[in-house]
Amino acid sequence: MSAVDIKFYEKKKSQTFYIAVALLFLVIAITVGLYYYSYTQTNTIQENQITLEQVNTSISEIQQDEKIQIYSVYAKNRPLFKTLADASKIPSMVNHLKRVFTIQWVNYKWFSYNDWKVQMELSLETNDSGYAYEKVTKFLKNYRANEEALFTIDQISSFSWYDRMNFSADLTLKTQ
């Protein structure tokens, strides 16, 4: 019979034991670390929830202020208020049209403004500076090309002509 070396098996058993114990301590250390991380995250979340509740309470108090409510309504409807303000600048519109008519040598007989639209009766006459129809064409072309024009020319509803060209035009206020 041959003799089996028992020391080899005993040495192997002790190595496995030490590896198992080391893994156990590693798992315990990781578990403690994860528990501590979870605990700190839970505390941070609770602190943030308390802060959020305080901020929401402050916002509710601010929203109850009448000045803030008025500004909120204004902010929501700002484009409408801007359009209405632009439409109510009648003196500046009249001055604009007078300036344009003076530059283009256009005579106006009458005009009316209603609901963002201007209706007017205009006339140009043939003289040394050119024929009336050329002046009308030049006026319409220049005004439509003018980036500072307050109105768009919608249509020429009627015209008559001999040495003086009379025409009716409809203009619509531009909105930004």
Image (cartoon, helix red, strand yellow):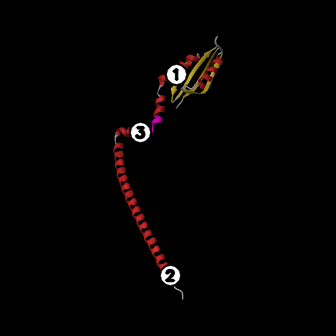
Position of 56 with respect to 81 (left or right) is left
Label 3: element kind: helix
Q: Which numbered marker is on residue 5?
A: 2
Which amino acid type is shown beneath numbered disc 1?
Answer: His
Label 2: element kind: loop
The image quadrant that residue 24 belongs to is bottom left
Q: Nearer the viewer, residue 161 or 15?
A: 15
Residue 63 location in percent, x, y?
36, 43
Which amino acid type is shown beneath numbered disc 2?
Answer: Asp
**Closer to the N terminus: mark 1 or mark 2?**
2
Q: With respect to residue 8, does 25 lie above or below? A: above
Q: Mark 3 Cα within 10 Å, few/some/many (few <14, many 20+)? A: few
**Closer to the N terminus: mark 3 or mark 1?**
3
Residue at mark 1: 96
From which residue to which does the magenta span run?
Answer: 72-80
Residue 61 covered by magenta stretch: no
Quarter occupied by the N terminus: bottom right
Residue at mark 3: 73
Residue at screen point 48% across, 24% down: 90
- Measure how far apart labels 1 and 2 are at the Cα level: 115 Å
Q: Mark 2 Cα within 10 Å, few/some/many (few <14, many 20+)? A: few
